[in-house]
């Protein structure tokens, strides 16, 4: 999965640039990353939203499945000026160990709610 070389945030495949740093993502941080992953829990951005309502629905869904997740949104931006690039978009982040399960839940949830959107 691609990483931001500046802040080391991990993104899902398909993301090209880091929203926070505005730099091009690199494919892997070989070696370094593996060591870091063993030591640290890393947060992975698995989806971005432009509607906070939907983001909160997904967050509630993931939490009901026991997955800890975080929304990086406008509320956080006001507290963290360096995240100001994220205004207008909401990032859903989960722990790297929960990515696969979270994606599965999101996928199922989207299929369930297609007609509601
Ligand atoms: Zn970055």
Image (cartoon, helix red, strand yellow):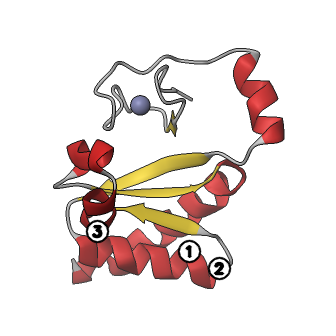
Marks 2 and 1: CB-CB under 8 Å? Answer: yes
In primary-sequence order, the first of circles 3 and 2 is 2
- Residue at the disc numbered 2: 65
Residue at image point 34% right, 79% down: 113
Q: Which numbered marker is on residue 103?
A: none
The residue at the point 56 percent across, 74 percent down is 62
Q: Is residue 91 above or below residue 113?
A: above
Q: Which label is found at residue 75?
A: 3
Question: Is residue 114 visible to us here?
Answer: no
Looking at the rendered structure, the secondary structure element under dot 2 is: loop
Indicate yes or no: mark 3 CB to ligand 1 under 8 Å.
no
Label 1 neighbourhood size at 10 Å, few (<14), some (14-19), many (20+)? many
Mark 1 lies on a secondary structure that is helix
The alpha-carbon separation of the residues under discs 3 and 2 comes to 24 Å
Towards the viewer: 74 or 29: 74
Ligand 1 quadrant?
Answer: top left
């Amino acid at each position: 999965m691609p990483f931001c070389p500046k802040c080391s945030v991990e993104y899902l495949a398909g993301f090209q640039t880091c929203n926070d740093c505005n730099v091009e993502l690199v494919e892997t941080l070989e070696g370094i990353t593996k060591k870091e992953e063993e030591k640290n829990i890393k947060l992975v951005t698995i989806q971005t939203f432009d509607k906070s309502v939907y983001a909160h629905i997904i967050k509630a869904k993931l939490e009901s499945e026991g997955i800890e997740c975080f929304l990086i949104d406008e509320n956080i931006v006001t507290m963290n000026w360096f995240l100001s690039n994220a205004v207008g978009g909401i990032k859903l982040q989960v722990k790297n160990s929960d990515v696969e399960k979270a994606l599965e839940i999101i996928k199922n949830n989207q299929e369930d709610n297609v007609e509601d959107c």
